[in-house]
Amino acid sequence: MRIADFDRPDTAAARAALQIATAYHSPSLLNHVQRSWLWAEGFAVQRGLAGRADHELLYVSALLHDLGIVPEFDNATLAYEDAAGHVAVALTAGAGWEPARRTRAHEVIVRHNWPEVDPGMDAEGHLLEIATGLDISGARADELPLEFQREVLTQYPRLELAAEFGACVADQAERKPGTSARRLVDGGVQRKLRDNPLERILEG
């Protein structure tokens, strides 16, 4: 498994998603969302979901899934993943997606923060949930080849993700205690970020 095995979708929505993510994310968060896409594609292969997944939908959702934590898209009351989902709806509408598929982008992004997503119900939501689980907390790292992990981390290094994302989620939890950010903080997301084995994988 190599990065070259996964083609970045060359569509209006995919190109716009990368442009928006690049314009509004810090380098650490931009690398995080791109790793999340690659982890999702890797898990799709390992779990036999590659043939079922809508790869453009997965890519766009992965690139936009954390936009709700950046100041320009931070919503006063909505969970950050919900706010990001609405950005995806607007972007994909501009790219000509049908309403039902725009709704799917919102669903996938919201569900990435669920504790678990049934792949039978939502393959793309499941893949993004486990991909971000790996990138944030190191969950299921043994499912993906070590050399693939090293290649991805070399091309898209983690930089200051642990400190930066941890601070953003803590801020969201304090201001919006009824959202999933509170559950993540109470579940030790800042510790999990620091202890994530991906933080040290290139040292070996």
Image (cartoon, rainbow, N blue to C red):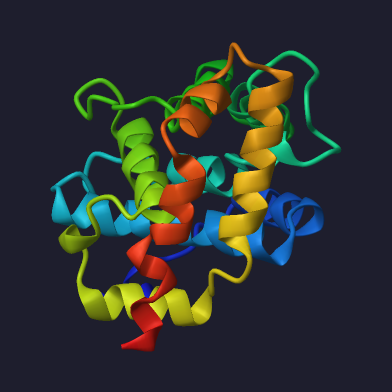
Query: Is residue 128 depicted above or below 37 in this figure?
Result: above
Quadrant of the rendered image containing residue 80: top right
Can you give x and y, in whole percent of width and height, for residue 134 in the image?
35, 52
Task: Decide which of 146, 5 is in the foreground and name it.
Answer: 146
Query: Is residue 130 depicted above or below 183 in this figure?
Result: below
Can you give x and y, in whole percent of width and height, for residue 195 in the image?
39, 59
Question: Residue placed farthest to the bottom in the image?
Answer: 204
Quadrant of the rendered image containing residue 96: top right
Residue drawn at point x = 17 percent, y = 59 percent: 143
From the image, which quarter does the N terminus lie in?
A: bottom left
Is residue 28 visible in this depiction of the protein? yes
Task: Decide which of 54, 124 is in the foreground and name it.
Answer: 124
Residue drawn at point x = 67 percent, y = 45 percent: 167
Q: Is residue 101 left or right of residue 165?
A: left
Residue drawn at point x = 38 percent, y = 50 percent: 137
Q: Is residue 21 left or right of residue 52?
A: right
Query: Is residue 22 depicted above or below 61 in this figure?
Result: below
Q: Is residue 158 left or right of residue 195?
A: right
Task: Decide which of 5, 155 is in the foreground and name it.
Answer: 155
Can you give x and y, in whole percent of width and height, for residue 193 in the image?
47, 54
Quadrant of the rendered image containing residue 178: top right
Residue drawn at point x = 28 percent, y = 50 percent: 139
Query: Is residue 178 depicted above or below 135 in this figure?
Result: above
Task: Decide which of 191, 147 is in the foreground and name it.
Answer: 191
Can you give x and y, in whole percent of width and height, for residue 68 in the image?
70, 33
Is residue 13 visible in this depiction of the protein? no
From the image, which quarter does the C terminus lie in?
A: bottom left
Question: Residue placed farthest to the right in the image?
Answer: 72
